[in-house]
């Protein structure tokens, strides 16, 4: 039926990592991957001088390039970068009112609003209400005002045991257009995935198909869970959220920005006549 309730997956993901503090820690590989691509493209003169990597900022692109693959005109493109196909591709928060009603919550940015709109169209709040509503308001939301560190083990263990992960697949999963629409609000039409390569989404404004860039053709699933927000030694530090994940992996692209593609090829395919650099 496309709705699976399972034991919690307590792995950390990119949304848990705030800024460069986590850069060299376990789970910070995504930032190092972004930085490696940024540096090699910058050395080739493809990155505008004014651009610096977004890091943990969700409202900025991971990479901004100026390219001229046709050898005629320069174009600026924004690129999202993911360490691999296990990364999350977009998130939203979940909260519960005092009357036990679940609702979507999160940043007030255009992309945040777009994500909530897409999830609402999928009836995610109703699905959460059906699966989690019977357990009442999570203890997390009734924690002492002095801070959630004062939560008793009994309370956070109740939340852990009650609010199991919900995975939406098949007919209940988000369509690939959900991914395209989400990044489209940031005018980002390209995505680099480690181990897979560079893809275009709903549009290919720089016509990178001619150099082997494929359209993203994977499928998605949605994970809904009680998610840890930091160290495993802080069991009271968690939130409730949704995350877009890859279900069926995309076909490997014919072009990549990472070290699987030589710098000579990057320069040749992205700026064959030296219009940029």
Image (cartoon, rainbow, N blue to C red):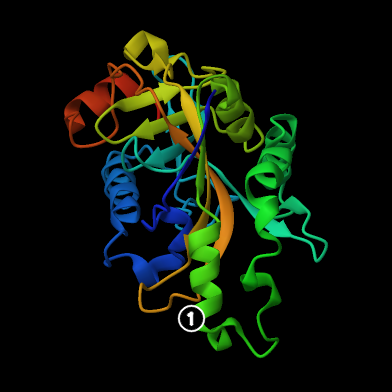
Question: Dot 1 lies on which element?
Answer: helix
- The one of 63 and 141 positioned closer to us in this rendering: 141
**Corner quadrant of residue 84:** top left
Q: Image check: 141 left or right of 237?
A: right
Vertical placement of residue 75 versus 167, above or below: above
In this view, the residue farthest toward the top is 210
- For image coordinates 48% across by 81% down, the residue present is 153
Residue where numbered disc 1 is placed? 153
Q: Image check: 256 left or right of 107?
A: left
In this view, the residue farthest toward the front is 134
Q: Position of residue 118 (x, y in %)?
A: 69, 33
Residue 106 in sight in this render: no
Residue 32 in sight in this render: yes
Q: Position of residue 260 (x, y in %)?
A: 18, 31
- For image coordinates 54% across by 42% down, the residue present is 90
Q: Position of residue 267 (x, y in %)?
A: 26, 28
Vertical placement of residue 82 versus 252, above or below: below
Estimate how packed mark 1 is, as few (under 14), some (14 to 19) or many (20 or more) residues with alpha carbons within 10 Å. Answer: few
- For image coordinates 34% across by 48% down, the residue present is 34
- The one of 161 and 263 positioned closer to us in this rendering: 161
- The one of 3 and 187 positioned closer to us in this rendering: 3
Pick the quarter of the image with the C terminus. top left
**Corner quadrant of residue 20:** bottom left
Tell how many labels.
1
Q: Position of residue 82 (x, y in %)?
A: 38, 41
Vertical placement of residue 81 versus 77, above or below: below
Pick the quarter of the image with the N terminus. top right
């Amino acid at each position: 039926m496309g709705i699976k309730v399972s034991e919690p997956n307590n792995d950390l993901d990119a949304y848990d990592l705030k800024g460069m503090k986590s850069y060299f820690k376990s789970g910070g590989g995504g930032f190092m991957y972004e930085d490696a691509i940024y540096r090699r493209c910058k050395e080739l003169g493809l990155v505008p001088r004014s651009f610096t990597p977004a890091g943990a900022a969700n409202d900025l692109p991971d990479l901004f390039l100026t390219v001229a693959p046709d050898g005629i005109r320069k174009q600026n493109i924004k690129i999202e970068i993911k360490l691999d196909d296990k990364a999350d591709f977009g998130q939203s928060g979940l909260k519960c009112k005092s009357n036990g009603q679940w609702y979507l919550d999160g940043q007030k940015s255009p992309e945040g609003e777009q994500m909530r709109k897409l999830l609402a169209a999928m009836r995610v709040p109703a699905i959460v209400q059906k699966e989690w509503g019977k357990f009442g308001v999570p203890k997390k939301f009734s924690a002492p005002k002095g801070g959630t560190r004062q939560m008793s083990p009994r309370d956070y263990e109740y939340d852990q045991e009650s609010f199991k992960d919900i995975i939406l697949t098949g007919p209940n999963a988000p369509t690939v257009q959900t991914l395209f629409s989400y990044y489209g609000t940031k005018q980002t039409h390209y995505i680099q995935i480690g181990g897979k390569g560079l893809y275009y989404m709903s549009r290919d404004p720089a016509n990178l198909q001619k150099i082997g860039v494929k359209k993203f053709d994977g499928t998605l699933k949605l994970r809904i869970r009680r998610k840890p927000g930091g160290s495993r030694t802080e069991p009271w530090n968690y939130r409730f959220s949704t995350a877009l994940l890859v279900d069926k992996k995309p076909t490997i692209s014919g072009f990549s920005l990472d070290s699987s593609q030589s710098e000579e090829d990057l320069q040749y395919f992205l700026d064959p006549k030296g219009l940029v650099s």
